[in-house]
Amino acid sequence: MTPENNTPRHGAPAVRARRQMEHFVADVAETPLQATDKVREDNAPLSLWGEAWRNLRRQPLFLIAAFLILVVMAVSLFPGLFSPVDPSSEACQLANSDGGPAAGHPLGYTQQGCDVYARVIFGTRSSVTVGLFTTLAVLLVGGIIGALAGYYGGWVDAILARINDIFFALPLILGAIVVMQLPMFRANRTAWTLVVILATFGWPQLARITRGAVLEVRNADFVMAARSLGVSRVGALLRHVLPNALAPIVVVATISLGTFIVAESTLSFLGIGLPPSVMSWGNDIQAAQSSLRSNPMPLLYPAIALSITVLSFIMLGDALRDALDPKARKR
């Protein structure tokens, strides 16, 4: 008897049954796969910013922050629309010193008899102006230095990195306090003076962020392709590298704007920022600290306005980070 005849054949009927089984395949028209896998070819793919905007519109955090920032910007541009009271020193009357809320004066009066609500409204312009223009100056200086260091590398990166390290070691507030004590700055304390000084000590962080973002993009395939087609190094940097490295720069700049508003208020509170004749939240907080125990409201309201404004820019920066950085996007 051959070995083949000795092999048990218990599985043969099952094999023949499987071979004789009929297979039914559903028609494609009867399945939802066609509708599920259908792609609209007439729609162009969204860019990074288009995808980010689509995600931002669905985030309550972004909507709340954007609304608050729009209100703050409107108040700083058109304060007269929000307060018909003249908050200048001529309108302050000592007879109203530390007075409570009254008709047309919902937040009461300061120790000098000035309307608290009007000063909070008109003080928005100085604080927001310093923060906004300082951020623009930091974007210009830090963006240029970081982009050149990250794109060219070599000795350019080495020199700019050492300069960056020197300024990065100087604290923002401490450096501004020291410089503002110099006679030439102490005699000329204006909003633009603060912008120059804060930008001088505030650009290193953004320069580092820009350098890191440019380093990630400069060796990308589309940059190499542009260079191979004859685009100059400067052209490739401006047209291809920087536009694709803007995401982290925008996020840091948005958060830094709130930081510079706090820095201006801190310097004004210490008496070395804006002069007392200029209405700002820092000056109002500094002037109200002497009557904190007897009448804390004149200090509380500008502090609340400052906190809400800074919190709005921080929330906007967090929302932009989640929308522009897929790795940090919340799930």
Image (cartoon, grey):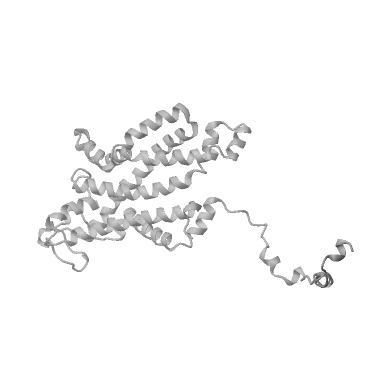
**Which residue is situated farthest in the top direction here?**
155
Left/right of residue 31 with respect to residue 249 in the rendered view: right
From the viewer's perspective, is residue 4 above or below residue 140?
below
From the viewer's perspective, is residue 162 above or below residue 87?
above
**Which residue is at 46% across, 55% downward?**
322
**Which residue is at 21% across, 56% downward?**
87
Q: Position of residue 294 (x, y in %)?
A: 11, 62
Q: What is the tally of numbered marks visible in this picture? A: 0
Q: Position of residue 238 (x, y in %)?
A: 51, 37
Residue 129 seen in the figure: no
**Which residue is at 22% across, 51% downward?**
282
**Which residue is situated farthest in the left direction here?**
95
In front of the other: 8 or 102: 8
From the viewer's perspective, is residue 20 above or below residue 239?
below
In front of the other: 86 or 260: 260
Q: Position of residue 287 (x, y in %)?
A: 16, 53
Left/right of residue 289 with respect to residue 310 in the rendered view: left
| Quadrant of res 33 | bottom right
| Quadrant of res 157 | top left
From the viewer's perspective, is residue 248 above or below residue 64?
above
Left/right of residue 203 with respect to residue 96 in the rendered view: right
Q: Point out the image quarter for the N terminus.
A: bottom right
